[in-house]
Amino acid sequence: MRTDEANGGRAGLVRELGAWDATAIMVSNMIGVGILTFPGLVAVALGNRELALAAWAIGGFASLAGALVHAELGSRHPNAGGDYVFLREAFGRPAAFLSGWTSFVVGFPGAIAASSFAAAQAFLDAVSPQASRWSAVALALALLAGISAVHAAGLRQSRLFQNGLVAGKLTILAVLIGGGLLATPAPDATGPLPAGPPPAIAALIVLFAYSGWNSAAYVAGEVREPRRNLPRALVGGVLLVTALYLAWNLAYFRMVPLERIGSINVGGEIARAIFGEKGMQVLSVALACVFAGSASAMVITGPRIYYSMARDGLFPSSLTEVSHRGRVPSRALWLQTLWAAGILVSGAALTPAHEGVSRTFEMIVDWTAFAILPFAALTTASVFVLRRREGSGTTFRVPCYPWTPLVFIVVALGVEVGFLVVGLRPVNAVIGILLVLSGVPAYLFWRKRPGSR
Protein backbone atom coordinates (compact mmCIF):
# COMPACT_ATOMS: atom_id res chain seq x y z
CA MET A 1 0.00 0.00 0.00
CA ARG A 2 1.49 3.32 -1.02
CA THR A 3 1.41 6.08 1.56
CA ASP A 4 -0.20 9.47 1.05
CA GLU A 5 3.28 10.96 1.03
CA ALA A 6 3.65 9.93 -2.63
CA ASN A 7 4.58 12.87 -4.79
CA GLY A 8 2.82 13.04 -8.11
CA GLY A 9 3.65 10.05 -10.27
CA ARG A 10 6.94 9.36 -8.56
CA ALA A 11 7.51 6.45 -6.26
CA GLY A 12 6.57 7.23 -2.69
CA LEU A 13 7.11 5.64 0.68
CA VAL A 14 5.17 2.44 1.29
CA ARG A 15 3.44 1.15 4.41
CA GLU A 16 5.26 -2.12 5.09
CA LEU A 17 6.14 -1.77 8.78
CA GLY A 18 4.04 -3.47 11.44
CA ALA A 19 3.72 -2.57 15.11
CA TRP A 20 6.72 -4.72 16.11
CA ASP A 21 8.88 -3.26 13.33
CA ALA A 22 8.21 0.26 14.60
CA THR A 23 8.76 -0.87 18.19
CA ALA A 24 12.10 -2.45 17.23
CA ILE A 25 13.28 0.83 15.70
CA MET A 26 12.21 2.70 18.81
CA VAL A 27 13.67 0.26 21.36
CA SER A 28 16.99 0.08 19.50
CA ASN A 29 17.07 3.88 19.29
CA MET A 30 16.52 4.25 23.03
CA ILE A 31 18.84 1.55 24.39
CA GLY A 32 22.37 2.73 23.75
CA VAL A 33 25.15 4.77 25.24
CA GLY A 34 22.95 6.41 27.88
CA ILE A 35 21.79 3.38 29.86
CA LEU A 36 25.02 1.43 29.30
CA THR A 37 27.29 4.12 30.72
CA PHE A 38 25.39 6.59 32.91
CA PRO A 39 23.51 4.75 35.73
CA GLY A 40 26.52 5.06 38.01
CA LEU A 41 26.75 8.81 37.39
CA VAL A 42 23.07 9.21 38.19
CA ALA A 43 23.54 7.32 41.45
CA VAL A 44 26.52 9.35 42.65
CA ALA A 45 24.90 12.61 41.52
CA LEU A 46 21.86 11.87 43.68
CA GLY A 47 23.93 10.28 46.46
CA ASN A 48 21.54 7.38 46.96
CA ARG A 49 20.74 4.18 45.07
CA GLU A 50 17.03 4.32 45.94
CA LEU A 51 16.78 7.89 44.67
CA ALA A 52 18.54 6.80 41.49
CA LEU A 53 15.96 4.05 40.90
CA ALA A 54 13.19 6.58 41.52
CA ALA A 55 14.77 8.93 38.97
CA TRP A 56 14.79 6.19 36.32
CA ALA A 57 11.16 5.37 37.11
CA ILE A 58 10.16 9.03 36.84
CA GLY A 59 12.05 9.30 33.54
CA GLY A 60 10.08 6.32 32.22
CA PHE A 61 6.80 7.84 33.41
CA ALA A 62 7.58 11.15 31.71
CA SER A 63 8.58 9.37 28.52
CA LEU A 64 5.34 7.38 28.61
CA ALA A 65 3.41 10.64 28.89
CA GLY A 66 5.24 11.97 25.84
CA ALA A 67 4.69 8.71 23.95
CA LEU A 68 0.94 8.83 24.62
CA VAL A 69 0.80 12.35 23.21
CA HIS A 70 2.81 11.32 20.14
CA ALA A 71 0.45 8.39 19.65
CA GLU A 72 -2.40 10.86 19.24
CA LEU A 73 -0.34 13.22 17.09
CA GLY A 74 0.77 10.33 14.88
CA SER A 75 -2.82 9.14 14.56
CA ARG A 76 -3.82 12.61 13.39
CA HIS A 77 -0.95 13.03 10.94
CA PRO A 78 0.54 9.59 10.12
CA ASN A 79 3.24 10.87 7.77
CA ALA A 80 7.02 10.58 7.69
CA GLY A 81 8.89 13.14 9.76
CA GLY A 82 7.57 12.83 13.30
CA ASP A 83 8.12 15.98 15.34
CA TYR A 84 8.77 18.06 12.23
CA VAL A 85 5.29 17.23 10.89
CA PHE A 86 3.55 17.84 14.22
CA LEU A 87 5.27 21.20 14.77
CA ARG A 88 4.50 22.27 11.20
CA GLU A 89 0.81 21.47 11.58
CA ALA A 90 0.50 23.13 15.00
CA PHE A 91 2.91 26.08 14.98
CA GLY A 92 3.95 26.58 11.37
CA ARG A 93 7.04 26.01 9.30
CA PRO A 94 9.59 28.17 11.20
CA ALA A 95 9.30 26.13 14.42
CA ALA A 96 9.25 22.88 12.45
CA PHE A 97 12.31 23.86 10.43
CA LEU A 98 14.36 24.81 13.51
CA SER A 99 13.56 21.41 15.02
CA GLY A 100 14.48 19.59 11.81
CA TRP A 101 17.58 21.70 11.35
CA THR A 102 18.81 20.86 14.86
CA SER A 103 18.20 17.17 14.16
CA PHE A 104 20.20 17.39 10.93
CA VAL A 105 23.11 19.52 12.12
CA VAL A 106 23.94 17.56 15.26
CA GLY A 107 20.99 15.57 16.64
CA PHE A 108 20.99 12.43 14.54
CA PRO A 109 24.46 12.61 12.88
CA GLY A 110 26.18 13.40 16.18
CA ALA A 111 24.49 10.50 17.94
CA ILE A 112 25.21 8.19 15.01
CA ALA A 113 28.89 9.18 15.07
CA ALA A 114 29.08 8.59 18.84
CA SER A 115 27.35 5.19 18.64
CA SER A 116 29.44 4.04 15.67
CA PHE A 117 32.67 4.99 17.43
CA ALA A 118 31.51 3.30 20.66
CA ALA A 119 30.74 0.11 18.72
CA ALA A 120 34.14 0.14 17.02
CA GLN A 121 35.99 0.86 20.27
CA ALA A 122 34.12 -1.90 22.12
CA PHE A 123 35.03 -4.43 19.44
CA LEU A 124 38.69 -3.39 19.41
CA ASP A 125 38.80 -3.59 23.22
CA ALA A 126 38.07 -7.30 22.81
CA VAL A 127 40.31 -8.21 19.87
CA SER A 128 43.06 -5.58 19.91
CA PRO A 129 43.17 -3.44 23.08
CA GLN A 130 46.28 -1.57 21.91
CA ALA A 131 44.71 -0.40 18.63
CA SER A 132 45.16 3.26 17.84
CA ARG A 133 42.47 5.91 17.84
CA TRP A 134 42.42 6.04 14.06
CA SER A 135 41.95 2.29 13.85
CA ALA A 136 38.75 2.76 15.82
CA VAL A 137 37.74 5.65 13.55
CA ALA A 138 38.37 3.58 10.41
CA LEU A 139 36.35 0.67 11.78
CA ALA A 140 33.54 3.04 12.83
CA LEU A 141 33.42 4.54 9.32
CA ALA A 142 33.28 1.07 7.76
CA LEU A 143 30.49 0.07 10.14
CA LEU A 144 28.54 3.25 9.37
CA ALA A 145 28.90 2.71 5.63
CA GLY A 146 27.77 -0.91 5.91
CA ILE A 147 24.72 -0.09 8.03
CA SER A 148 23.74 2.72 5.67
CA ALA A 149 24.08 0.45 2.64
CA VAL A 150 21.70 -2.08 4.18
CA HIS A 151 19.08 0.55 4.99
CA ALA A 152 19.46 2.21 1.59
CA ALA A 153 18.89 -1.12 -0.18
CA GLY A 154 15.21 -1.25 0.69
CA LEU A 155 12.61 -1.09 3.43
CA ARG A 156 12.23 -4.87 3.64
CA GLN A 157 15.96 -5.48 4.09
CA SER A 158 16.10 -2.58 6.53
CA ARG A 159 13.25 -4.02 8.59
CA LEU A 160 14.75 -7.52 8.81
CA PHE A 161 18.21 -6.19 9.65
CA GLN A 162 16.93 -3.90 12.40
CA ASN A 163 14.69 -6.56 13.91
CA GLY A 164 17.67 -8.91 14.09
CA LEU A 165 19.80 -6.27 15.80
CA VAL A 166 17.18 -5.45 18.40
CA ALA A 167 16.59 -9.15 19.11
CA GLY A 168 20.33 -9.55 19.74
CA LYS A 169 20.41 -6.42 21.88
CA LEU A 170 17.52 -7.59 24.07
CA THR A 171 19.10 -11.03 24.44
CA ILE A 172 22.41 -9.53 25.60
CA LEU A 173 20.70 -7.28 28.14
CA ALA A 174 18.50 -10.14 29.37
CA VAL A 175 21.58 -12.33 30.00
CA LEU A 176 23.37 -9.59 31.94
CA ILE A 177 20.27 -8.58 33.89
CA GLY A 178 19.39 -12.19 34.68
CA GLY A 179 22.92 -12.92 35.80
CA GLY A 180 23.03 -9.77 37.90
CA LEU A 181 19.76 -10.57 39.65
CA LEU A 182 20.49 -14.28 40.23
CA ALA A 183 24.22 -14.37 41.00
CA THR A 184 25.68 -13.91 44.46
CA PRO A 185 25.56 -10.19 45.20
CA ALA A 186 28.53 -8.06 46.15
CA PRO A 187 29.05 -7.35 49.87
CA ASP A 188 26.69 -4.49 50.76
CA ALA A 189 28.92 -1.80 52.18
CA THR A 190 27.42 0.99 54.23
CA GLY A 191 28.21 4.66 53.97
CA PRO A 192 27.85 7.34 51.34
CA LEU A 193 28.37 6.82 47.63
CA PRO A 194 31.46 8.29 45.96
CA ALA A 195 31.28 12.02 45.23
CA GLY A 196 29.64 12.87 41.91
CA PRO A 197 28.38 15.76 39.83
CA PRO A 198 25.54 18.03 41.06
CA PRO A 199 22.07 16.44 41.18
CA ALA A 200 20.77 18.51 38.25
CA ILE A 201 22.97 16.55 35.84
CA ALA A 202 21.17 13.34 36.85
CA ALA A 203 17.87 14.60 35.43
CA LEU A 204 19.45 15.53 32.11
CA ILE A 205 21.24 12.17 31.91
CA VAL A 206 18.05 10.21 32.60
CA LEU A 207 16.03 12.09 29.98
CA PHE A 208 18.86 11.66 27.48
CA ALA A 209 18.92 7.90 28.15
CA TYR A 210 15.19 7.77 27.40
CA SER A 211 15.52 9.91 24.27
CA GLY A 212 14.27 8.12 21.21
CA TRP A 213 10.88 7.31 22.79
CA ASN A 214 9.28 9.24 19.91
CA SER A 215 11.29 7.61 17.10
CA ALA A 216 8.47 5.33 15.95
CA ALA A 217 6.59 8.49 14.90
CA TYR A 218 9.33 9.38 12.41
CA VAL A 219 8.47 6.34 10.30
CA ALA A 220 4.70 6.81 10.62
CA GLY A 221 4.49 7.22 6.85
CA GLU A 222 5.66 3.60 6.45
CA VAL A 223 3.60 1.95 9.22
CA ARG A 224 0.61 -0.19 8.24
CA GLU A 225 -2.65 0.92 9.84
CA PRO A 226 -0.83 3.70 11.71
CA ARG A 227 -3.82 4.74 13.80
CA ARG A 228 -3.74 1.29 15.39
CA ASN A 229 -0.11 0.21 15.17
CA LEU A 230 1.64 3.49 16.01
CA PRO A 231 0.14 3.81 19.53
CA ARG A 232 1.03 0.16 20.15
CA ALA A 233 4.63 0.76 19.13
CA LEU A 234 5.07 4.00 21.08
CA VAL A 235 3.43 2.91 24.33
CA GLY A 236 4.68 -0.69 24.23
CA GLY A 237 8.23 0.42 23.43
CA VAL A 238 8.42 2.85 26.37
CA LEU A 239 6.99 0.30 28.80
CA LEU A 240 9.49 -2.35 27.64
CA VAL A 241 12.47 -0.01 27.88
CA THR A 242 11.43 1.35 31.29
CA ALA A 243 11.22 -2.19 32.67
CA LEU A 244 14.65 -3.01 31.23
CA TYR A 245 16.20 0.19 32.62
CA LEU A 246 14.91 -0.47 36.13
CA ALA A 247 16.07 -4.10 36.03
CA TRP A 248 19.45 -3.00 34.66
CA ASN A 249 19.93 -0.58 37.55
CA LEU A 250 18.89 -3.20 40.09
CA ALA A 251 21.44 -5.64 38.65
CA TYR A 252 24.12 -2.92 38.69
CA PHE A 253 23.49 -1.94 42.32
CA ARG A 254 23.29 -5.58 43.37
CA MET A 255 26.54 -6.74 41.78
CA VAL A 256 28.86 -3.73 42.01
CA PRO A 257 30.56 -2.84 45.32
CA LEU A 258 29.57 0.51 46.76
CA GLU A 259 32.98 2.06 46.22
CA ARG A 260 32.92 1.22 42.50
CA ILE A 261 29.51 2.74 41.77
CA GLY A 262 30.06 5.72 39.51
CA SER A 263 32.07 3.91 36.84
CA ILE A 264 30.81 4.68 33.35
CA ASN A 265 31.50 1.09 32.26
CA VAL A 266 28.26 -0.20 33.75
CA GLY A 267 28.00 -3.27 31.54
CA GLY A 268 31.63 -4.08 32.22
CA GLU A 269 31.13 -3.87 35.96
CA ILE A 270 28.16 -6.25 35.82
CA ALA A 271 29.99 -8.67 33.52
CA ARG A 272 33.10 -8.64 35.70
CA ALA A 273 31.02 -9.40 38.77
CA ILE A 274 29.23 -12.31 37.04
CA PHE A 275 31.82 -13.82 34.67
CA GLY A 276 35.18 -12.54 35.93
CA GLU A 277 37.81 -10.70 33.91
CA LYS A 278 37.55 -13.02 30.89
CA GLY A 279 33.88 -12.21 30.61
CA MET A 280 34.89 -8.64 29.80
CA GLN A 281 36.13 -9.68 26.37
CA VAL A 282 32.88 -11.39 25.48
CA LEU A 283 30.98 -8.41 26.82
CA SER A 284 32.95 -5.99 24.66
CA VAL A 285 31.84 -7.80 21.50
CA ALA A 286 28.27 -7.87 22.81
CA LEU A 287 28.36 -4.14 23.55
CA ALA A 288 29.65 -3.50 20.03
CA CYS A 289 26.43 -5.09 18.74
CA VAL A 290 24.33 -2.99 21.12
CA PHE A 291 25.94 0.27 20.01
CA ALA A 292 25.70 -0.75 16.35
CA GLY A 293 21.98 -1.35 16.83
CA SER A 294 21.53 2.19 18.16
CA ALA A 295 23.40 3.68 15.22
CA SER A 296 21.32 1.57 12.86
CA ALA A 297 18.01 2.79 14.30
CA MET A 298 19.06 6.43 13.93
CA VAL A 299 20.24 5.83 10.37
CA ILE A 300 16.65 4.80 9.64
CA THR A 301 14.74 7.58 11.40
CA GLY A 302 16.72 10.75 10.66
CA PRO A 303 16.30 10.77 6.85
CA ARG A 304 12.49 10.79 7.20
CA ILE A 305 12.75 14.28 8.72
CA TYR A 306 14.92 15.66 5.92
CA TYR A 307 12.62 14.00 3.37
CA SER A 308 9.62 15.87 4.80
CA MET A 309 11.54 19.14 4.98
CA ALA A 310 12.53 18.77 1.33
CA ARG A 311 8.91 18.08 0.37
CA ASP A 312 8.04 21.45 1.89
CA GLY A 313 10.78 23.13 -0.14
CA LEU A 314 12.89 23.78 2.95
CA PHE A 315 15.75 21.45 2.03
CA PRO A 316 17.30 20.37 -1.29
CA SER A 317 14.56 19.00 -3.54
CA SER A 318 16.72 15.97 -4.42
CA LEU A 319 16.12 14.65 -0.89
CA THR A 320 12.47 13.97 -1.79
CA GLU A 321 13.60 11.16 -4.06
CA VAL A 322 12.49 7.72 -2.97
CA SER A 323 14.29 4.76 -4.54
CA HIS A 324 11.98 2.89 -6.93
CA ARG A 325 13.12 -0.56 -5.88
CA GLY A 326 13.74 -0.07 -2.18
CA ARG A 327 11.15 2.66 -1.48
CA VAL A 328 13.40 4.50 0.98
CA PRO A 329 14.62 8.14 0.95
CA SER A 330 18.10 7.00 -0.02
CA ARG A 331 19.59 10.40 -0.87
CA ALA A 332 18.55 11.83 2.47
CA LEU A 333 20.01 8.75 4.13
CA TRP A 334 23.39 9.05 2.42
CA LEU A 335 23.56 12.79 3.13
CA GLN A 336 23.09 12.06 6.82
CA THR A 337 25.75 9.34 6.65
CA LEU A 338 28.27 11.70 5.07
CA TRP A 339 27.57 14.34 7.70
CA ALA A 340 27.90 11.79 10.52
CA ALA A 341 31.19 10.60 9.03
CA GLY A 342 32.42 14.20 8.99
CA ILE A 343 31.51 14.64 12.66
CA LEU A 344 33.24 11.35 13.49
CA VAL A 345 36.50 12.27 11.78
CA SER A 346 36.43 15.85 13.06
CA GLY A 347 35.75 14.70 16.61
CA ALA A 348 38.74 12.35 16.50
CA ALA A 349 41.01 14.96 14.92
CA LEU A 350 40.08 17.74 17.35
CA THR A 351 40.36 15.65 20.51
CA PRO A 352 43.73 16.19 22.27
CA ALA A 353 46.02 13.18 22.24
CA HIS A 354 45.85 12.74 26.02
CA GLU A 355 42.03 12.61 26.05
CA GLY A 356 39.68 9.91 24.87
CA VAL A 357 37.57 10.57 21.79
CA SER A 358 34.52 9.52 23.79
CA ARG A 359 34.87 12.77 25.77
CA THR A 360 34.39 14.75 22.57
CA PHE A 361 31.23 12.84 21.76
CA GLU A 362 29.99 13.42 25.31
CA MET A 363 30.20 17.15 24.56
CA ILE A 364 28.19 16.66 21.37
CA VAL A 365 25.61 14.77 23.43
CA ASP A 366 25.44 17.71 25.84
CA TRP A 367 24.79 20.13 22.98
CA THR A 368 22.11 17.87 21.56
CA ALA A 369 20.35 17.14 24.85
CA PHE A 370 20.14 20.82 25.72
CA ALA A 371 18.91 21.80 22.25
CA ILE A 372 16.23 19.14 21.77
CA LEU A 373 14.41 19.35 25.12
CA PRO A 374 12.57 22.63 24.30
CA PHE A 375 11.47 21.18 20.95
CA ALA A 376 10.26 18.02 22.67
CA ALA A 377 8.16 20.15 25.03
CA LEU A 378 6.85 22.27 22.14
CA THR A 379 5.96 19.19 20.10
CA THR A 380 4.04 17.79 23.06
CA ALA A 381 2.19 21.10 23.33
CA SER A 382 1.08 20.61 19.72
CA VAL A 383 -1.72 18.39 20.95
CA PHE A 384 -3.44 21.39 22.58
CA VAL A 385 -3.38 23.36 19.33
CA LEU A 386 -4.43 20.48 17.09
CA ARG A 387 -7.27 19.36 19.37
CA ARG A 388 -8.69 22.88 19.34
CA ARG A 389 -8.27 23.22 15.59
CA GLU A 390 -9.14 19.71 14.40
CA GLY A 391 -11.36 18.40 17.18
CA SER A 392 -10.81 15.18 19.11
CA GLY A 393 -12.19 12.67 16.64
CA THR A 394 -9.16 10.41 16.17
CA THR A 395 -8.73 6.69 16.62
CA PHE A 396 -6.40 7.25 19.57
CA ARG A 397 -6.84 9.92 22.22
CA VAL A 398 -4.43 10.82 25.02
CA PRO A 399 -5.77 9.53 28.35
CA CYS A 400 -6.06 11.94 31.30
CA TYR A 401 -5.95 14.93 28.97
CA PRO A 402 -4.68 17.65 29.57
CA TRP A 403 -2.60 16.34 32.48
CA THR A 404 -0.67 13.77 30.47
CA PRO A 405 0.95 16.27 28.07
CA LEU A 406 1.47 18.73 30.92
CA VAL A 407 3.48 16.12 32.85
CA PHE A 408 6.02 15.78 30.06
CA ILE A 409 6.18 19.53 29.36
CA VAL A 410 6.80 20.35 33.03
CA VAL A 411 9.49 17.67 33.38
CA ALA A 412 11.29 18.66 30.16
CA LEU A 413 11.28 22.38 30.88
CA GLY A 414 12.12 21.80 34.54
CA VAL A 415 15.24 19.86 33.58
CA GLU A 416 16.21 22.58 31.11
CA VAL A 417 15.80 25.34 33.70
CA GLY A 418 17.64 23.31 36.32
CA PHE A 419 20.51 22.82 33.88
CA LEU A 420 20.76 26.60 33.43
CA VAL A 421 20.28 27.58 37.07
CA VAL A 422 22.92 25.20 38.36
CA GLY A 423 25.27 26.43 35.64
CA LEU A 424 26.50 23.00 34.58
CA ARG A 425 28.72 23.18 31.53
CA PRO A 426 27.44 26.64 30.49
CA VAL A 427 29.58 26.62 27.35
CA ASN A 428 27.77 23.53 26.11
CA ALA A 429 24.42 25.20 26.81
CA VAL A 430 25.47 28.23 24.79
CA ILE A 431 26.64 26.02 21.92
CA GLY A 432 23.29 24.20 21.97
CA ILE A 433 21.45 27.52 21.69
CA LEU A 434 23.71 28.68 18.85
CA LEU A 435 23.10 25.44 16.97
CA VAL A 436 19.37 26.09 17.08
CA LEU A 437 19.75 29.76 16.11
CA SER A 438 21.94 28.82 13.15
CA GLY A 439 18.75 27.51 11.60
CA VAL A 440 17.26 31.01 11.35
CA PRO A 441 19.36 32.19 8.36
CA ALA A 442 19.04 28.72 6.84
CA TYR A 443 15.25 28.94 7.06
CA LEU A 444 15.21 32.44 5.55
CA PHE A 445 17.35 31.15 2.68
CA TRP A 446 15.17 28.14 1.90
CA ARG A 447 11.91 30.04 2.35
CA LYS A 448 12.81 32.39 -0.50
CA ARG A 449 13.55 29.60 -2.95
CA PRO A 450 10.95 28.87 -5.65
CA GLY A 451 10.18 25.36 -4.39
CA SER A 452 9.20 26.49 -0.88
CA ARG A 453 5.54 25.88 0.00
Image (cartoon, grey):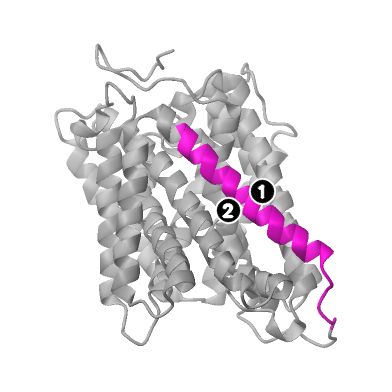
What residue is at 27 percent from the left and 21 percent from the top? Answer: 324
Q: Quadrant of the C terminus?
A: top left
* Amino acid type of the residue tagged 1 in the rendering: Val
Position above or below: 182 against 242: below
Left or right, 436 with respect to 320, comes to right
Cα distance between the residues tagged 2 and 1: 7 Å
Closer to the camera in the image, 23 or 214: 23
Visible residue check, residue 200: no
- Residue 101 belongs to the span the image colors magenta: no
Residue 282 placement (x, y as % from top left): 57, 66
In which quadrant of the rendered view does residue 390 lie? top right
Q: Which residues are magenta?
A: 159-188
Q: Which residue is mark 2?
A: 31
Q: Which residue is mark 1?
A: 241
Quarter of the N terminus within the rendering: top left
Front residue (pair 151, 191): 151
Q: Amino acid at mark 2?
A: Ile
Q: What residue appears at the point 70 percent right and 73 percent down from the top-left corner?
A: 43
The verdict on residue 162 being magenta is: yes
Q: Residue at x 38, y 34 (%)?
A: 92
Q: Quadrant of residue 182?
A: bottom right
Mark 1 closeness class: few <14, some 14–19, many ≥20 residues within 10 Å? many
Measuring from the top left, give residue 305's x and y in whole percent. 37, 38
Q: In terms of image quadrants, where is residue 349?
A: bottom left
SS state under label 1: helix
Q: Are marks 2 and 1 in contact (CB under 8 Å)?
A: yes
Left or right placement of residue 335 versus residue 4 in this view: left
User: In what element is the residue under mark 2?
Assistant: loop
Crowd band around label 2 with a 10 angstrom C-alpha radius: few (<14), some (14–19), many (20+)? many
N-terminal-most mark, 2 or 1? 2
Point out residue 101 in the picture as x, y percentages from the top left corner: 32, 47
Residue reaching furthest left? 450
